[in-house]
Amino acid sequence: MKAIKTSILGLLFLLLFLPQASATHQHHFPGKQLSVTQLTPRTDAVVFEQVSFDLEIGKISNSDWGQLRVKPDRLKDRLGKAAGPGYVNVFIYNRNRGEQASWVIDNLFVPGSQVTSESSKFSGTDWNKDKIHPYVPDSSNRLPEHPEATAYFDLRPGIDGQGQKKFLRATVLFSQQPLPTIVDIAQLANRFFPLNFSVSQTVVNAEGAGHVDGRISPVSSSVPSALALGRPPQPVSPDPNLPDDFLFPIQIIQADQPNLDAGRNQCIPMAHANALQYLEDRYDNLPLLWRLPQLHIRGIGKVSSAGDVLFWVAEPDNSLVANIDSYSRRDGVLDLNSGGYTSFCGLIRGIFGYLNDSGSQAVTEFRHQGSNSALLGSGADCDNGTVLMGDITSTQEGANPTWEWIFEQLSQGRAVTILFSWYDINGNWQGGHSVRVYGAATFNDKKYLYTLDDASQGDNFSNLTNPRTQQWEVADTGQPGLDGIPDGRLNMNGMSWEIDFALSYEARPTLLIP
């Protein structure tokens, strides 16, 4: 511990006098250094946004929710070379609270600008296997190769504010290793000269997941709209001591693509489709066969009728997500800009029904945590006879999702999706969302999940230019409306947002023997 403290003090000394510095840690391999750089607005590597929400419960304009976006390919060191992978920490200053910095972004992981995966095959086309490309709607094939890392934060710490925010004063630090969330680092941040960053406006409408108890229609909250989603992630409270696992971060990171544009409220079918396409990209390579008959392109399960009988049609019929959506049977789906929530049983029937009809070369085994169902699928819970699911089922492996279970599933090469809900400050359910989890990490005595989704659902191709990945600290910090009283479920970033359900998809490829 004495050696660790010595190396930390050395780091602090260098940071005090250099906006860009490096320090060698004694417990790292020789030559490994922890470099720290203060990022400025001129770099264009970080973007601060004020979030307005456009949800089923209504619009929340000019909220206290901030979103930081970090562009990996814009991160450069003092020599102009790519600086990633690494971590970003943000300290902002609120003049109403004096000059004390609020540590609002805690070690946001930013992948390197060189992204690789096991395979990169989309829309029936083989791409350069060293890079990942999402679906291209035209023949240009020119796409961003490095998804942005994002995280929510409190734009006005300590204040339930109103109105538009145009600028903020902040110190933004980038390091190749996570910084310990300790008092010394927080005091160090106050010695940097804070810079003025512009704050742009963004609208988030990502939602569409019904509650595990069957609810699919969120009811507008009676609390002020600014608190309808609870409060945003609160600033870090630094610890006086070093965390036990500071020098030993552990993580598993899968490919952060595909991440296709979703239709309105289409998060569950899209999470399924992104998960299945990831498995095909990874396992459909000789001598293995694990193949889907449709392409990973945009589409919907459109509602049609014959007299009083409703039925759902995949449009276009060669779209993977459109076919899954059609088995999910959402209400009101007429185009990419319309459609209701997917129910919890629609989540199950959508993926199992699709694979029963189209998955003869994509055999998949499922397991889950969460819900009250020991067995989901064919002949079990959620089988109401409306969708044929063959003999596909999912077995429960825990009453509530845990970080350890998700980490294990990812480590074994399986895809994972989660369903989470958000609540107002009184604990009333206000909606839900489903995303694919592509990574998990633990460091600084904290546990994190990394997810991907479409922040701006609808007919807009937003994920072509700004595909979103997010980092969430997960821990049981309290139940909705009763902060600090655990209920066994993981909260996201300490908020009144809880992970209700996690589903694991294990590909069972066929071995082709010549």
Image (cartoon, rainbow, N blue to C red):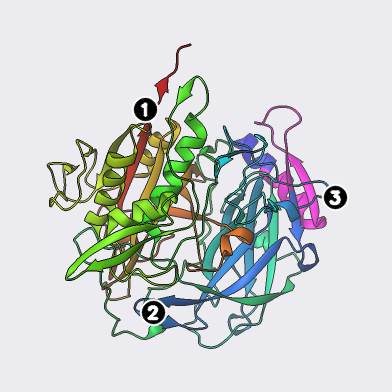
User: Pointer 2: residues within 10 angstroms few (<14), some, or many (20+)?
Assistant: some
Which numbered disc, 1 or 3, marks the residue that appears first in the sequence?
A: 3
Give the residue number, with chain letter if any, for mark 2.
227
Circle 2 sits in a helix, a strand or a loop, which is it? helix
Numbered range of the magenta stretch: 8-35
Circle 1 sits in a helix, a strand or a loop, which is it? loop
Q: Quadrant of residue 290?
A: top left
Q: Nearer the viewer, mark 1 or mark 3?
A: 1
Give the residue number, with chain letter if any, for mark 3.
80
- Residue depicted at x 64% and y 38%: 127
Is residue 299 among the parts visible in the rendering?
yes
Give how far apart the Cα atoms at labels 2 and 1 are. 45 Å
Measuring from the top left, give residue 355's x and y in whole percent: 31, 41
- Residue depicted at x 49% and y 48%: 296
Whether tag 2 and tag 3 are in contact, CB under 8 A, the answer is no
Three-letter amino acid code of the residue under disc 2: Leu
Measuring from the top left, give residue 257's x and y in whole percent: 55, 46
User: Pointer 1: residues within 10 angstroms few (<14), some, or many (20+)?
Assistant: some
Give how far apart the Cα atoms at labels 1 and 3 are. 45 Å
Circle 3 sits in a helix, a strand or a loop, which is it? loop
Give the residue number, with chain letter if any, for mark 1.
508
Which numbered disc, 2 or 1, marks the residue that appears first in the sequence?
A: 2
16 vs 111, left or right, is right
Q: Nearer the viewer, mark 2 or mark 1?
A: 1
